[in-house]
Image (cartoon, rainbow, N blue to C red):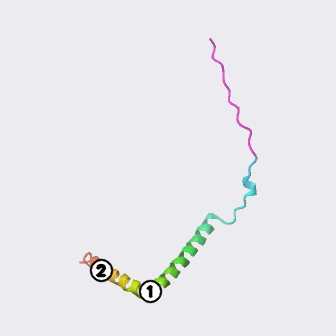
Amino acid sequence: MAMKKTTTKKAPAKKSTTAAVKISATPKAEMRKWEIESALSTLKRADEIRKDAKMMNDVKKLAQEQMSVLKTFSK
């Protein structure tokens, strides 16, 4: 018995809809915008922390502890 030869047809190509999508900025520009927004958020948070006396005391205490530990490595 002879084997049937099968052929596969390619699906008809669809029209690209990406032409309708408008890209506003390059990925590099988008990344830069995100970094700037993140930096602004960080600066706002830092200002809030500086104004919180109890938090700053705790931060200073932790910084002193970590500096003591780091001094042991420099000996």
The residue labelled by disc 2 is 65
Q: Position of residue 61 (x, y in %)?
A: 33, 83
Q: Quadrant of the C terminus?
A: bottom left
Q: Nearer the viewer, residue 55 or 59?
A: 55
- In the figure, residue 68 lies in which quadrant? bottom left
Q: Position of residue 12 (x, y in %)?
A: 74, 38
Based on the picture, tell me whether residue 44 belongs to the magenta stretch.
no
Determine the residue positioned at 62% across, 11% down. Answer: 1
> Does the residue at mark 1 contact the one at mark 2 (Cβ under 8 Å)?
no
Residue range in magenta is 1-14
Q: Secondary structure at mark 2?
A: helix
Query: Which mark is on residue 39?
Result: none
Q: Nearer the viewer, residue 48 or 29?
A: 48
Based on the picture, tell me whether residue 11 belongs to the magenta stretch.
yes
Q: Position of residue 38 (x, y in %)?
A: 54, 74
Quick check: 56 above or below 19? Answer: below
* Pointer 1 or 2: first along the chain: 1
Dominant secondary structure of the residues highlighted in magenta in the image: loop
Label 1 neighbour load within 10 Å: few <14, some 14-19, many 20+: few
- In the figure, residue 65 lies in which quadrant? bottom left
| Number of marks present in the image shown | 2
In-image side of 58 versus 33 (left or right): left
Quick check: 30 above or below 68? Answer: above
Mark 1 or 2, which is nearer the eye? Answer: 1
Quick check: 9 above or below 44? Answer: above
Query: Which mark is on residue 52?
Result: 1
Identity of the amino acid at label 2? Glu
Determine the residue positioned at 72% across, 54% down. Answer: 18
